[in-house]
Amino acid sequence: MCGMNRVSTDRGTFCCHAVLMPRLPRRIASDLNARLRSPETAAVVAGLESKLTERRRDYKLQSGAFRGVRVVVYRGFAADDVAKVRVRVIETPELPGDSRIPYWEVAQSNLRRHAALSIVGAEVELRVGRHRATEVTDSHGFANFSLPVPKLKVGWHAAEAVAAGIGDDEPAVGSGWVVKPSLAAPFLVISDIDDTILLTGLTEGLAMVARTLLREVEQRNAIPGMSALYRGLARGVAGRSGKLRPEPAFFYVSTGSWSFYSMLEQFIELRAFPPGPMFLTDWGPTERYLRRSGAEHKRAAVRRLFDAYPGMRFVLIGDSGQRDPLIYEEMAREFPDRVLLAIIRQVGSDEEERNALLREHAEALQGEGIPLHLVADPSEAAELAHSLLLCDGDTVAEARDELGD
């Protein structure tokens, strides 16, 4: 029986739900869904959004409310003598005023990251050393560079981006970094962020939203023990000669928005994780996609790095709360022998069906030669990595100290 109110008419009694919300035939609903998800629809919506953004910018310029331009240079990476760098040009954010309401200023700042006005069609020049290239920002203010950087040395390099001024403003400058990993390193590391290194509580619903909106970066908690594990992986193990091999580069992947980049960058520095390029998501519509798939974003980012460094092996680190285990398994099958270790941090208790099934599946994968392991905590992960000579014994002790064991 329908739990909604029922309506009586001269033709009988009907359920309100049936009268007010008729169900579309399956074929029509399927066709409608396909149209909404099509690249053609996405292109139309993205075009409308771009025009609205331009009108918003023009109105601010005419009214004198425009606050100037800010250029954000996200950490990039170099492979095959090409630097991949993303830049965004936005209006300078407005800082919230003093408020007596607890957490209100923090919430305003975090929300304004998403509401920042994108500067569409801005010409941007990127400079890495003596190498330069020019691109134009898209409908969300992003400019994606593939800058040739022949003979670039291994390590971190300063990157500078200059955007043309808006109206009477002077050109705006932003700075960032580009890393060229050493191909002599024993491996590269790809890590998830949410609930792998940063406590977000994605499985907790409103609790996760509250943490995201109401806490400053200094108040965001790292997963205890993970920082020690990552520093140990970066440090590595001395060889027979007593020398350490070059440090591996770290890459961070998340379904979070690029709007949270500055917070995540500060978090990584404050909690002593190794710095590295991030692969985040643009939550708005694009010319190809009206709605993004978080799992596909992660899958594409990981595959991109495997393709960028074909001679390298990888350590993959994620958690059991999302689709990391499936994606890492797929990568291990797609790129045989290139996954050195896949660590999945357990989210939740041993008794949860999801974790019980994953533990059983991981053991089956290990029998196939796929090194995917579900670990209860970072000290167990450190012990596993140490047994494979990926980190030293100090790493295990440091992880236990962070956990308070």
Image (spheres, grey):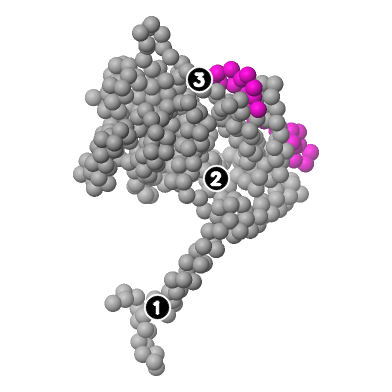
Badge 2 or badge 3: first in the primary sequence? 3
Nearer the observer, 10 or 123: 123
Amino acid on which disc 2 is placed? Asp
Is residue 168 located in the magenta-colored stretch of the structure? yes
Q: Residue at x 32, y 41 (%)?
A: 320
Q: Is residue 226 left or right of residue 148?
A: left
| Residue wearing tag 3 | 182
Q: Which residues are magenta?
A: 148-176
Q: Which residue is mark 1?
A: 18
Mark earlier in primary sequence (1, 2):
1
Between the residue at mark 1 and the residue at mark 3, the CA separation in whole angstroms equals 64 Å
The residue closer to the viewer here, 372 or 370, is: 370
Q: CA distance from mark 1 to mark 2?
A: 38 Å
For image coordinates 50% across by 64% down, the residue present is 33
Which amino acid is tagged 3?
Ser
| Quarter of the N terminus within the rendering | bottom left
Contact between marks 2 and 3 (CB within 8 A): the answer is no
Say what amino acid the circle numbered 1 marks.
Answer: Ala
Q: Quadrant of residue 394?
A: top left
The dot on residue 282 is 2
- CB atoms at circles 1 and 3 under 8 Å apart? no
